[in-house]
Image: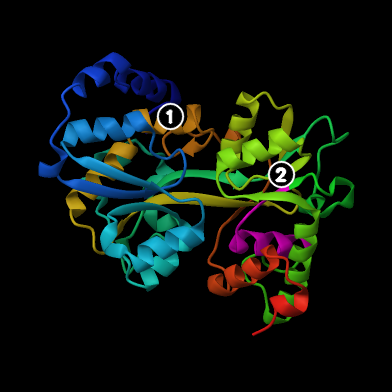
Amino acid sequence: MISASTFLAACRRSILPVAALLALAATPPLWAAQPVLRVLAWPGYAEPEVVQRFELEHQVKVELTVVTSDATLWEKVSAHNHDFDVFAVNTAELQRYIAANLVQPIHAGKIPNTHNQLARFRDLSAIPGLMHNGKAYALPYTYTQMGLIYDRKQFRTPPHSISALWDERYRGKVIAYDGGTHNFSLAAQSLRLASPFRIAPKDIPRASERLIELRRNTLGFYTQPDESIQLFMRHGAALMFANYGMQQVQMLKQAGADIGYVIPQEGALAWLDCWSITRDARDPALAHDWIDHLLDPQASLLLVERQGLSNTMVDDRNGQPNGKPLWLEPPEDTVRREMLWERIRSGDRLTRVLAP
């Protein structure tokens, strides 16, 4: 493992000067005669210069598709597996891709930059969900906790519970994420159910009613980080559930917002996103090269400096908010959660939400 100072120095040395990149790109390659790598990623995961450097070094074209929800990612990979080669997915969601035979094993030996990862990320067998039948199906890339962002001017003291999202004092000033899987987990936390990831059938009506109450308390829902920033700044929001965690904190601070960030007493949902290769990838070797490239110093540094996310190379746990991370687990029924959320989101009453 390399030290943080050595890693950061290597990062800065590895970043190509803009002038050099422009010079290399001055003569456009003949994309038609070159391989194409089809990538599915979340906002900020593959910065333009990172993509460009990969294209130049490997003489390929990268087709980058950005996704903003687990539901969209699943739809694309499950229905159009042959159209994509490599994608970023959290460890909980990964399980259904493995179960549906939509991904193929990854060979860490073909990805040299894994040697620079922290020990806890190199030991794939110690990370729940990555290994199946002795084979690894993804490699760790980035992670964060999903806490609460609040406007310091509207809170005398920081909110301490996830239930603050339902506080009627902030009606019309709450921003929430537009996703059923996570929202049902939040409802379960607010109801103090045994697990946010395993909601019993008898508790589904209570959780649904709780989300109807959240809808009534909310000024808007977002899917992309930049969309959440616009909503927060434009409408003078008081509180926001940070689905993208520190990424949104950094973006809001850059926009001039006076905000705080807390982990609620119930604990914060936390995700570990990994790179995985689709079952029908055209060129698995090139997909391995992409993962190695995204684990190099430049890409890893940009995750921290531009996105406010954590990478797997430098231990920054001391810089994260205190609190208990609740690492995402596969929910009891993702499809049902999303279906119910769509009904709730559209304004249906509880009877219609729960209708067959």
Residue 113 versus residue 276 in the image, above or below: above
Quadrant in the rendering for residue 130 = bottom left
Left or right: residue 235 versus residue 156 is left
Mark 1 neighbour class, 10 Å CA radius: few under 14, some 14 to 19, many 20 or more: many
Please provide the residue range marked out in magenta: 175-191
Query: From where the camera sits, is residue 123 visible?
Result: no
Left or right: residue 166 versus residue 329 is right
Residue 199 versus residue 221 in the image, above or below: below
**What x and y, as percent, mark residue 204?**
71, 75
**What x and y, as percent, mark residue 304?**
49, 31
* Dominant SS type (magenta): helix
Query: From where the camera sits, is residue 107 visible?
Result: yes
The residue at the point 29 percent across, 20 percent down is 16
Give the amino acid type for the residue marked by disc 1 in the picture.
Answer: Leu
Q: Total label count?
A: 2
Q: The residue tagged with tag 2: helix, strand or loop? A: strand
The residue carrying mark 2 is 240
Q: CA distance from mark 2 to mark 1?
A: 25 Å
Residue 126 versus residue 227 in the image, above or below: below
Residue sticking out furthest to the left: 33
Left or right: residue 118 versus residue 245 is left
**What x and y, as percent, mark residue 218?**
76, 52
Colouring convention used in this rendered image of the protein: rainbow
Front residue (pair 290, 42): 42
Give residue 302's mark. Answer: 1
The residue at the point 49 percent across, 26 percent down is 305
Give the amino acid type for the residue marked by disc 2 in the picture.
Answer: Met
The residue at the point 28 percent across, 59 percent down is 83
Question: Magenta segment: does it hold 180?
Answer: yes
Which mark sits nearer the N-terminus, 2 or 1? Answer: 2
Question: Magenta segment: does it hold 190?
Answer: yes
